[in-house]
Image: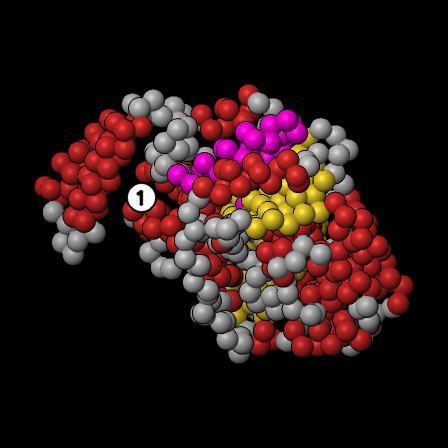
Amino acid sequence: MAFSLRTWLTAAALLAGLASRPLPAQDLKSFEERTTVHKLANGWTFVLVRRPVAPVFSFVTLADVGSAQEVPGITGLAHMFEHMAFKGTPNIGTTDWPAEEKALAAVEQAYQAWQAERLSAKPDPVKLEPLRVAFKQREDEAERYVIKGEFDSILQREGAVGLNATTGADTTRFFYSLPANKLELFAYLESERFFRPVFREFYQERDVVQDERRYSVDSQPLGKLLEQLIGAAFVAHPYSHSTIGCTSDLESFTRTDAEAFYRTWYAPSNLLTVIVGDVDPQAAIPLLEKYFGRIPARPEPPRLRTVEPPQIAEKTIVLEDNSEPLYLEAYHKPASTDPDEPVWDALDLVLSNGRASRLYRSLVRDKKLAVSVSTFSGIPGTKYPHLWGVFVVPAQGIDLAKVKDAVRSELERLRSGDLTDSELARAKRRARASLLRDIQSNEGLARQLADAQRSTGDWREAFRYLDRMDAVSRGDVRRVATQAFVAANRTVGMVVRTAASASGAAPGKEIQ
């Protein structure tokens, strides 16, 4: 469940857009015969795909909420709820729920008193320490009732594998696989943790998240650079803040804040579950109604209003660090639902998919400027207009200005229309092959369908996407490249050495 900006960028570079890409169009009819969509009265939508290859099933529950739904003061709460969703319920994870419930209320009351003094205009040190001690005492008292990890233990004992969750800017996902005869166990446990989650050990877990931030962002040159670059690229949209949350928010948001966030954003109508495997919909739907149907409907969450304005000036971030140099170059692009999304995917594949790709041949093989180069998309999300870019790890001793020139030379080639039919055809074949590999697993197929259902309202769009990719022309690639790859739409991020900078530029100097 750990959040990692390095993992985020690496995955984006290698698998950019796979979650929103298609299944083979010719398979749509066969999947329609095996796929059932069922929506509960409370608004929770289920997509069930019968795939009796083995007596197992996988699922993905997708909550349409991420860090883009946060506001200053509570950044990091979406990720925090991901952690809380594994802490159990009044029936799971406790030795005595009535007593624990009272103890948890006392913990929150003590914390709120301590925080009120700590965040006051003139905190009184004489008052602070007794309030902190009282809070810690209440925590210790509540801890006596906790059965640690019981939710996980139940599932692992019953054969679950791949138990995990992830949080991004747009969505939070929960997933694992179980034997097919454990469907009712799944229905009970998965519904229970969204019906009545207990935010036990909240402040201890908040400390864990702070450690995650220190490890993945504060102590990592790439994590720091990426956070700064995203913050510079977005001036209005909440994509500007980190999914893991800013440090002061991670030190200050409360269990009361988290419970309010949960009540707003985890309404059944904002949740979607895709189940793929040896599952008979006729047998499954009554179980889904029984367990998930007991969750009361809640108001539809508010829609995000803020729209990021067009970038009007090139921006450059230079991070001085005692580490190896890095180079990032990012451009704003439309949301994944934009008609040009397949064009961007084709452009990605031409530039950085494999050793025959343009950026690899130019920067790594021919000019020896880099040890690795890749493109990325979906930073920090895809639901709204976001970032596409190039990430380069320069070869030792290489001036970053040379890296910059080489990258822009390749982008300029696309702007000029220098793209062959064979290159475009190869990109389309690679896209199809990647997707075919991805959907071989139940979990991979569940992810594909969940993303399509969430973003378009129709899981079938996952199958139709490759038709759109096949229709991409050389003119489309040139048009998109010409519109996007301009200075005013660009944000550059660099890591330069604090001593004897490998970039050859004075610290803080912008590359024009």
**Residue 469 image-quadrant placement:** bottom right
Q: Which residue appears at 71% of the width and 47% of the height? A: 35
Near-viewer residue (175 or 402): 175
Q: In the current view of this chain or complex, which residue is farthest to the right?
A: 422
Direction from residue 227 to residue 419 in the image, left or right: right
The residue singled out by tag 1 in the image is 255
Residue 155 spot, x, y in % from top left: 54, 27
Residue 14 spot, x, y in % from top left: 69, 50
Q: Is residue 267 above or below residue 481?
A: above
Instruction: Residue 344: tell me if it is visible.
Output: yes
Residue 370 spot, x, y in % from top left: 70, 54
Q: Is residue 276 above or below residue 433?
A: above
Which color scheme does this rendered protein use? secondary structure
Q: Is residue 43 above or below residue 456?
A: above
Range shown magenta: 173-196
Q: Magenta part mainly helix, strand or loop?
A: helix
Q: Which residue appears at 70% of the width and 59% of the height? A: 461
